[in-house]
Amino acid sequence: MKDIEFVSYNGKYPNLCSGVLTLRVDGKIRQFAWCLISGGHCDVYEDLCRRGEWDIKDDVFSEFTENEKEFIRLLVNKNVEKGCCGGCL
């Protein structure tokens, strides 16, 4: 398994999911844009946003094994504010 560390994420309201995720992979800085999927939900009729855990876009991380992808998901959810910012409404 590759050595993967969280460095930063720069997504901000109103498009929290559209940031750049920066990871250190085997000692090298790597950046992944538009790579997160919000696990939250917005309902315009109830004027309600529920925040949820992040998922990652598998195609952006296709070079990684399933175990590495799961580790990246865990790192993201540990370090990035839970999503649903409502920016898609």
Image (tube, rainbow, N blue to C red):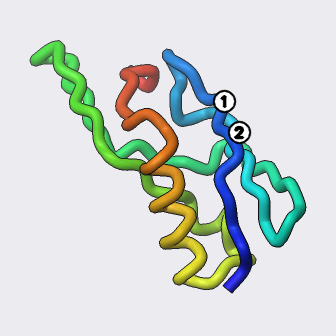
| 69, 59: nearer the viewer | 69
Amino acid type assigned to the residue bearing label 1 in the image = Asn
- Does 82 sit left or right of 65 as displayed? left
Mark 2 = which residue? 20
Amino acid type assigned to the residue bearing label 2 in the image = Val
User: Residue 4 placed where, x, y %?
Assistant: 69, 67
Q: Residue at x 62, y 84 (%)?
A: 65
Q: Residue at x 49, y 61 (%)?
A: 73
Q: Residue 5 sits in which quadrant?
A: bottom right
Report the quarter where the C terminus lies: top left
Q: Residue at x 13, y 17 (%)?
A: 45
Instruction: Determine whether label 1 and label 2 are within 8 Å by CB.
Output: yes
Dot 1 alpha-carbon crowd within 10 angstroms: few under 14, some 14 to 19, many 20 or more: few
Mark 1 = which residue? 10
Instruction: Single out the residue that lies furthest toward the right.
Output: 28
User: Residue 26 placed where, x, y %?
Assistant: 82, 71
